[in-house]
Amino acid sequence: MVDRDADSAEREPDPFATPAEDPTPATAEPGRRDRKKLQTRDELILHAARLFDANGFDAVTTEQIAEAADVSQRTFFRHFPSKEAVLYADTDVLRERMRAAFDARPADEAVTLSVTHAMMAITNDYPDDRDLRYLQARLGSTSPALSAYARAVVQASWEHELTTAIAERLAVDPLEDARPEILAGAAFSALRAATRQWFAHDGRGDLPEVLRRALGAIARLDARAI
């Protein structure tokens, strides 16, 4: 099989296609080599989602994903360490978006309200990414391995980032003061509960609104006690 990094023919829009994070500064145009890498990454994300949707997560191999994208398995692993990582390819983007939303809030704002705004930033692209979020929820409900990855890798990295942000806001050491970790943990419990509720209704509701309601329990806490 030929390892292809050349430009591919134009395709019809796909519900699982997600924009790749561009590592270059906004003012700089990526070079030809970088464009090829980003295109290959997008192709892997797209074909992985299609295969997962059709066959389930556990039945699909990294070799099949690479073959569908017309690249070698070695090329796959240059972009992603695992098939779990390709399904959650936007993990870093969403973590940075969440942190930026928290940091943008007024320093004297109730921390619970700042946490709510930060968590809502995770769903900023809904409904554009609705199909991907539903696919992640559906596959996670049937694959223990994927569910564990989502919890132990994806959400753990987000929760750590939020814990750090809250600790900096409160000017405390999270290893000595439990409040940042407790509040961040509550926020991600709300995210998991909202996602399960949304998925239980076949994704027909508005996920951001479901999440907002779940976070409402946190936002109503006495900020002075936090």
Image (cartoon, rainbow, N blue to C red):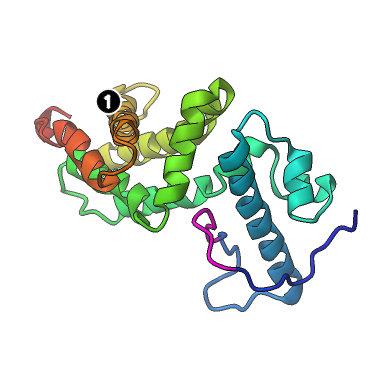
Given the image, on which type of amino acid does mark 1 rest?
Arg
Q: Residue furthest front?
A: 54
| Left or right: residue 194 compared with residue 13 | left
Task: Give the residue at x 66% y 63%.
Answer: 38
* Residue identifier under label 1: 179
The percent position of residue 39, horizontal first and vertical second, equals: 68, 65
Between residues 158 and 1, which one lies in front from this camera angle? 1
Residue found 49% across the figure and 29% down from its top: 140
Residue 222 picture quarter: top left
Secondary structure mostly seen in the magenta stretch: loop
**Residue found farthest to the right:** 1
Q: Quadrant of the C terminus?
A: top left
Q: How many marks?
A: 1
Query: For residue 14: magenta?
Result: yes
Q: Is residue 85 visible?
A: yes
State the residue in front, 24 or 137.
Answer: 137
Q: Position of residue 182 (x, y in %)?
A: 30, 24
**Could you tell me which secondary element the residue under label 1 belongs to?**
helix
Q: Is residue 79 left or right of residue 166?
A: right
Res 151 seen here? no
Most foreground residue, 86 or 137: 137
Q: In the rendered structure, which segment of residues is drawn in magenta?
A: 12-19
- Report whether 207 appears left or right of 61: left
